[in-house]
Amino acid sequence: MGKQESLTLPAFEEAYECVKKVTLDTKLIYSDYWSQVTGGKVYLKPENLQRTGAYKVRGAYYKIMTLSDEEREKGLITASAGNHAQGVAYAAKAYGVKATIVMPTSTPLIKVNRTKALGAEVILHGDVYDDACDMALKLADEHGYTFVHPFDDLDVATGQGTIAMEVIKELPTVDMILVPIGGGGLATGVATLAKLLNPKVQIIGVEPEGASCMKESLKNGKVTTLPSVNTIADGTAVKTPGEKIFPYIQKYIDDIVTVPDEDLVVSFLDMVENHKMVVENSGLLSVAALKQLDTKDKRVVCVLSGGNMDIITMSSVVQQGLILRNRIFTVSVLLPDKPGQLAAVADIIAKTNGNVIKLEHNQFVSINRSAAVELRITLEAFGSEHKEQIIQTLEEHGYKPKIVRTNI
């Protein structure tokens, strides 16, 4: 089969059987935390635990299956800085097919090495994905390689749609599926198959606020390119959605929600603390969107599309999340420059159960040192209420604390 002009139920069924050979069974996880917060029954589809840490292996493997022997022997080529690269490399290795991946020169070394470790040849070219993609298409022309598009390919989208088959088999009564959108391949596959199996299932696409190319395209009734994208959700930072898949999005997606970056930051914290799972920013779009939707008494599945996040990004997201949740904050107080003042402030903080992380003592804040020296205290609190309590107690003792906007 494959090479289809449309996404059909027989193709999805074929893909479902096909991808089982290379995928892990990512069973739904019931989320007590998000169910409590929303009043619905929220389940997570943890594709962050999938082989290579994302759903992409599904579409890549099914795409290879649909090719002729001749096309396979010529080898595959694609461009990607992220999950698609590893998905294609893994699927090609599993099929015994040669793969070449063009990655932008800015790709983190760990991603380059992981892709090479899966047996693919890696070519570094250009500053951004678009440059790498142009090079991949040029090499495909020169050498006759088969180009595997990250999202704008009906066979690839069919492979990604196998997620919906698994969800509905496991939770036939699902009312709503939330799915991240970058270029739209995952959303196309999931929405089309879910609606074929049960037209009543609501499908909500979720995009980062700073890269809402699909929302813009739907509004304009045609594929639209954004002038620029700006989001921490790098896996969904796409300017132009797919042309071939756009009609399916128009037909089967019920709504699109956009999520600001700060909601992704605190969702990362929630996911780590409540589920002990690392999910990348793009993968968190579905849970971050929950607060914008009425999911009361509904059975909701959030697709966590991937978990590939480098440690530096992770530490920065955790830090920002703690600040946004008022779990860490910095306060400035002015003290007379005389002995015992620091101990007095520390005592007040200790009595309110605040935990001091860092202290900065600046004697040169004022010309008149006896009038004032500045003490900057970075504190750990339990949240907004506790933070307010600490500030209020300092005020009651005659200090005038000022919140300082700062990183840790």
Image: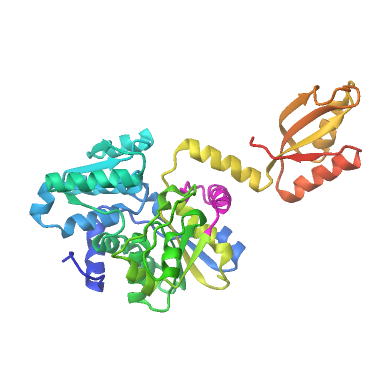
List x then y, in percent, for residue 261. Answer: 54, 51
Question: For residue 47, which quarter of the picture?
Answer: bottom left
Give coordinates of residue 178: x percent, y percent: 46, 64
**Left or right of residue 133, residue 235 in this image:** right
Q: Is residue 35 visible?
A: no
Residue 284 to residue 403: above or below: below
Left or right position of 199 against 61: right
Residue at far left of view: 70
Q: Main secondary structure of the magenta part?
A: helix
Front-most of residues 127 and 61: 127
Q: Is residue 312 visible?
A: yes
Residue drawn at (42%, 79%) of the image: 200
For this view, does 132 lie left or right of residue 231? left
Q: Which residue is nearer to you in this view: 365 or 265?
A: 365
Check residue 1 for magenta coloring: no
Up the image or down, 223 lies above or below 9; here it is above
x and y percent of residue 62 in the render? Answer: 22, 58
Residue at the image point whose x is 21% and y is 57% from the top: 63
In the image, is residue 273 part of the stretch drawn in magenta? yes
Q: Residue at x 49, y 35 (%)?
A: 312
Identify the residue at image location x=49%, y=49%: 231
> Can you say which quadrant of the picture contains the N terminus?
bottom left
The quadrant in which the C terminus is found is top right
Q: From which residue to which does the magenta span run?
A: 259-281
